[in-house]
Structures are given as structure tokens and as C-alpha cells.
């Protein structure tokens, strides 16, 4: 009777050990998968950071181009404003001479 009880205990112990090993293997596979996901996410993050940097550079270039490109109307308007400012400065200089 004791032998039967010991055999049952050993069988139950063996089943539990097999279950633990199976759970360990499942967790090990899940851990590997999650590590791969982390690596993939870091690569994607680097790609996105590079893209953001490139887009910011393109935006700055576009702003600079917009500032430098002056249409004919804007050029005439700017020339008139500068001429007006120069005349006003000349008047102020004349007034200071008096």
C-alpha cells in the first residue's frame, strides 16, 4: 500500500514538473518574442526620429526659401518701404544738423 502511494506521489510530482517545464518553455518563447518586439520598436523609433529630423530640415529650408523668394509685387512694395525709410532718415539727419 505504501508503494502504491509513493508511486502516485512520484507520478503527481512528475506531472507537476512536466507542467512547470512546459510553462517555462512557453514563457521562454514569449520572452524571446517580446525581446524581438523591443528590438523592432527601437529600430522603428530610430527610423521615425531620422524622418522627423529630415522633415524639420526640409521645413527650415522651405521657410528660408519662402523668405528669400520675393515675388514682383513684394519686391516693389519692399523697395518703396525702404525708399520711404531712407527719406525719413535723411529728414531726421537734416533736422539734427539745424
Image (cartoon, rainbow, N blue to C red):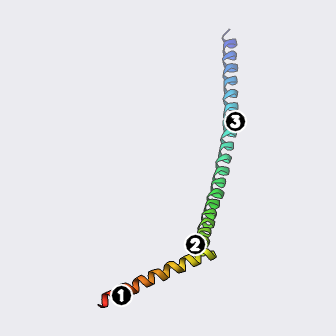
**Mark 1 or 3, which is nearer the eye?**
1
Foreground of the two, 67 or 42: 67
Foreground label between 2 and 3: 2
Location of mark 3 (residue): 25
Q: Is residue 5 above or below residue 71?
A: above
Dot 1 or dot 3: first in sequence order is: 3
Q: Quadrant of residue 63?
A: bottom right
Q: Which residue is mark 1?
A: 93
Q: Residue furthest left?
A: 98
Q: Residue at x 54, y 77 (%)?
A: 78
Q: What x and y, as percent, mark residue 57?
A: 61, 67
Q: Which residue is mark 2?
A: 67
> Quadrant location of the C terminus?
bottom left
Q: Residue at x 68, y 50 (%)?
A: 40
Classify mark 1: residues with Cα within 10 Å, few (<14), some (14-19) or many (20+). Answer: few
Q: Quadrant of residue 31?
A: top right
CB under 8 Å between callouts 2 and 3? no
Secondary structure state at the residue bearing disc 1:
helix
Amino acid at each position: 500500500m505504501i508503494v502504491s502511494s509513493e508511486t502516485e506521489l512520484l507520478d503527481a510530482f512528475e506531472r507537476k514538473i512536466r507542467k512547470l517545464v512546459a510553462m517555462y518553455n512557453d514563457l521562454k518563447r514569449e520572452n524571446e518574442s517580446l525581446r524581438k518586439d523591443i528590438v523592432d520598436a527601437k529600430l522603428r523609433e530610430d527610423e521615425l526620429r531620422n524622418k522627423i529630423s529630415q522633415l524639420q530640415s526640409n521645413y527650415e529650408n522651405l521657410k528660408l526659401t519662402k523668405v528669400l523668394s520675393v515675388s514682383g509685387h513684394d519686391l516693389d512694395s519692399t523697395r518703396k518701404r525702404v525708399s520711404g525709410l531712407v527719406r525719413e532718415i535723411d529728414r531726421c539727419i537734416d533736422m539734427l544738423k539745424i
